[in-house]
Image (cartoon, rainbow, N blue to C red):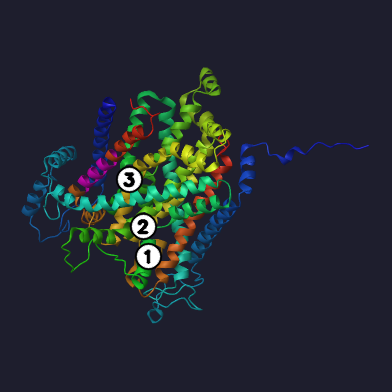
Amino acid sequence: MTSFIIRRLLISVLLLFIISVISFFIITLTPGSPYPWGELNPKVSPEVKRVFREKFHLDRPLTEQYTLIMRDLFSGRLRSIKDERPVLEKIGERLPATLVLNLGALALSLSFGLMLGVYGARHAGRLPDVVTSVLAFTFIALPGFWISYLMAIVLVNWAAVPILGTHTIGVDFTNGLEVFLDGWWHIMLPASILAIGGIAVQSRFIRASMIDTLREDYIRTARAKGLDENAVFYRHALRNSIRPLLTGVGMLLPTLISGSVIIESIFAYPGMGRLGYEAVLERDYPTLVALNFVTAALVLGGNLLADLLYAVVDPRVRLE
Amino acid sequence: MIINTPEPLALVPASPAGRAWRRFRDNKIGMVALGVVLLLALIGVVFFTLNHLGIPFPADPDATNLERKLLAPNAVNWLGTDNLGRDVLSRLLNGAHISLTVGFIAVFVSLFIGVTVGAVAGYFGKWVDNIIMRIVDAIMCFPTFFLILTAVALLGPSIINIVVVIGLVSWTGTARLVRAEFLTLRETSYVQATRALGQQAPRIIFRHILPNAAAPILVTAVLGVPDAILAEAGLSFLGFGVQPPQATWGNIIADGKTYILDAWWLILFPGLAILIAALSFYLAGDALRQAVETRSARQ
């Protein structure tokens, strides 16, 4: 177990290195410049440009720029080109909001995906299964930004669900519980919309896994000894086919973070996705590199956690 | 005296493709989805041609008319008009070919890379496989949409850039699949035999192994099209898609969101178009998977 964790951590470090190289070169090799003024602006003196270039190491060769960026990132000195605040500080204040949003969406994806998938497998090949399958594909095909706006139209007109921000503006809750509930009330809609695709993908995996499990010999044995179908299905089969639930964690994370770029922009949600979108618009190289690095680290961490849970949940799996 | 004539052999097609088509034909949902896909392709071709010939049908998609702006669906403008008085239906019909082109070409790019990389990794195995698959793992950790957004924003939004960037970040799934197929197929006796006959690796890979992995590759290709369509719609929505005045389904919604509470038709209809296009590709792809998947009896 320990050797497994150590090896996985080493591989993760290697992956993070590859990821940082790829993201650095994608960002820097593309045309365009990060200057806050236009490239040819005559009002900016060469001296100002030189100082700016030096400050962000833009006068160095690319390989050296890369090592400098990584050095600064790890020592916490990396600063945003736009407002010259430390990048880690900027990400740090956005991280909790994104984590809450994505973990909420993940929980919704896993739980509703499980229900939908189990329901489909229970009625495999019959009408309810066909209906849930088509429903799942519809969920995957739904453009997140579109359903966000439709929900906004509906909710603004007919319900009082908040559609912007993370807390009610102009109300000071003194009670911790009220602050907490207010937060959840705000996060409900974006998290549900973010979870739609995940629910669908997860339900497909659970369904396939259940159908495979139902063909196993021990299921036949369970039926043969006269157990009723519900016991066979929910006690014997379900337990052995929840593995995709954990694989799903690793697979869903990048998708969810991708999705939160759009969802956070729409719902004025102060998370990392929106920070990234703003950084793209402003060509803020250091922030973009750091953001890619942090999200990749989160995804790798999530994957490792999922694999460890795998071994805890399923004694047949041995980590080596 | 009764002569028993043998069953005509033609009833069971001999080729695997023929048998797969028969199974596909029995899948009602798959056939409907395929019909919608073909209809969309027809719409794309017809309206692209009409627009280029300068025939405004049902109306010129780019003709503005400020006296008729933000009209709800009515007898003249079936799906209403936008903030510049342009006919939404015409713009939707003329946006179809953008979505489809992006979908198909992006998939072509990603297939090209994915199949090559996967084939090399799976065929040669050992350290080649190890290095390639670590890179694939690394790319899979990226939130892809964010990567696409970064690259397109920095390169500039043109249809070629969008297609290439979407293709460049979406090949990893195909590569994994092709690698897995190759790992099993290269151990089969017919591949061993061709190797014993002294054939070169490229020939074995492309002539002997690849055709046997064609079915699963085709399925991922079909399922990749809607992914690309949705990615393009998202980019268009954020303003990094194909640029105006060319109408795309995503940018009609992006333009319409300013009028969200007054003009629901600017949001509803383009989104439905995206949904229908993506859904029909997914359902057709899933039906295709069921038709070619003979190894497991999974439905």
Say if mark 1 contacts mark 2, CB within 8 Å.
yes
* Residue on which the image places disc 2: A193
* Residue on which the image places disc 3: A253
**Which residue occupies the extreme right position in the image?**
B1
Gap between marks 3 and 2, in whole Å?
A: 15 Å
Whether residue B244 can be seen here: no
* Residue on which the image places disc 1: A151
Q: Is residue B14 left or right of residue A41?
A: right
Q: Earlier in the sequence, mark 3 or mark 1?
A: 1
Give the residue at x 25% y 52%.
A98
Residue B79: % across, % down: 47, 72
Q: Earlier in the sequence, mark 1 or mark 2?
A: 1
Which amino acid type is shown beneath numbered disc 2?
Answer: Ile
Which amino acid type is shown beneath numbered disc 1?
Answer: Met
Which amino acid type is shown beneath numbered disc 3?
Answer: Leu
Please check the rendered image and state whether residue A295 is part of the magenta-colored stretch, yes or no: yes
Stretch in magenta: A288-300
